[in-house]
C-alpha cells in the first residue's frame, strides 16, 4: 500500500519520515508542479527540460538554513538544475518593488510577520512573528463598528464614500 508523507510541517521540512522518503516526496511535488502529474497541470515543462534549467527558491522568512540547504541540494544535484537563486520572501518582496531597504509586513488569515530588510539582507533581530492575522483584524473592525452603532449603516456608508470619490 501507499504511505502518506507530508514533507513540510510548520514552515519547514518534516523530519518524521526517513530522509529517502522525504527527498522522494519533495521531488515528486516539485516535478508535479513543473511538469504536471498527480492531477496537477504543471507549468508545461517536460521532465527532460529540468536538467539545465535555472530556478528561484523562495523560502519563508526564518526558514531553517539546514532545510534550505537540503532543498538547494535536491534542486541542483538530484533534479539536475543548472543554477538556483535562494532568497527569503522579504528580500524578494523588496526586489519586486525595486527597493533595497524596507519593513516588509506579511499578513495572512491567521498569522503575520514583520521583517526589516536593509540592502536586501533581512536584519537579524529585526523580525517578529504575529500570532494574529487578517481574520482577527476583521473581527476587531466588526466589533468597533458594532460598539459605535455603525454596523447597521455599513452599506450606506460605503455607498456614500463611493459617491464622494
Image (spheres, rainbow, N blue to C red):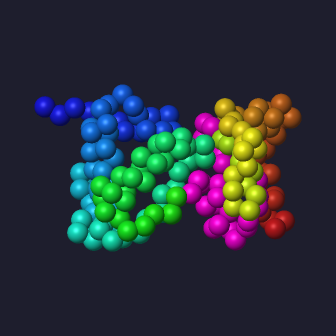
Q: As rendered, which of 115 and 87 lies closer to the eye?
A: 87
Q: Residue furthest top?
A: 16
* Magenta span of residues: 87-111
The residue positioned 27% from the left and 60% from the top of the image is: 36
Above or below residue 69? Residue 87 is below
Residue pictured at 41% horizontal, 34% vertical: 14
Q: Is residue 71 left or right of residue 150?
A: left
User: Which of 99 and 82 lies nearest the eye of the viewer?
Assistant: 82
Give how far across and how far down residue 71 sits, in percent. Answer: 42, 50
Q: Quadrant of residue 43?
A: bottom left
Left or right of 104, for residue 77: left
Q: Nearer the viewer, residue 65 or 96?
A: 65
Asked if residue 81 is positioned above or below residue 16 in the image, the reply reads below
Quadrant the C terminus occupies: bottom right
Tell me, yes or no, whether the highlighted magenta stretch contains residue 110: yes
Query: In the image as oriented, which residue stretches furthest toward the left?
Result: 1
Q: Which residue is rendered at x = 43% and y = 67% of the image?
A: 83
* Residue closer to the observer: 101 or 43: 101
Quadrant hosting residue 1: top left
Left or right: 91, with 48 as reference point: right
Residue 67 seen in render: yes
The location of residue 39, given as percent across then percent down, is 25, 53
Is residue 133 rendered magenta in the image? no
Can I make out residue 44 in this image? no
Rendered image quadrant of residue 111: top right
Residue 107 image offset from top left, x and y in percent: 66, 46
The total number of labels drawn is 0
Q: Please tell me which residue is depicted at 61% across the width and 47% down the height of the picture.
A: 61
- In the image, residue 84 lies at what x, y percent? 45, 63
Amino acid at each position: 500500500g501507499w504511505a502518506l508523507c507530508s514533507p513540510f510541517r510548520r514552515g519547514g521540512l518534516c523530519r518524521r519520515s526517513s530522509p529517502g522518503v522525504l527527498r522522494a516526496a519533495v521531488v515528486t511535488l516539485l516535478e508535479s508542479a513543473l511538469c504536471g502529474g498527480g492531477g496537477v497541470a504543471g507549468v508545461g515543462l517536460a521532465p527532460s527540460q529540468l536538467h539545465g534549467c535555472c530556478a528561484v527558491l523562495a523560502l519563508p522568512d526564518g526558514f531553517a538554513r539546514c532545510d534550505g540547504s537540503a532543498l538547494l541540494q535536491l534542486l541542483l544535484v538530484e533534479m539536475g538544475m543548472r543554477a538556483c537563486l535562494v532568497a527569503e520572501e522579504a528580500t524578494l518582496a523588496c526586489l519586486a518593488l525595486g527597493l533595497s531597504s524596507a519593513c516588509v509586513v506579511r499578513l495572512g488569515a491567521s498569522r503575520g510577520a514583520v521583517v526589516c530588510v536593509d540592502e536586501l539582507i533581512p536584519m537579524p533581530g529585526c523580525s517578529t512573528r504575529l500570532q494574529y492575522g487578517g481574520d482577527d483584524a476583521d473581527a476587531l473592525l466588526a466589533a468597533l463598528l458594532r460598539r459605535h452603532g455603525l454596523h447597521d449603516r455599513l452599506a450606506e456608508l460605503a455607498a456614500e464614500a463611493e459617491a464622494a470619490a
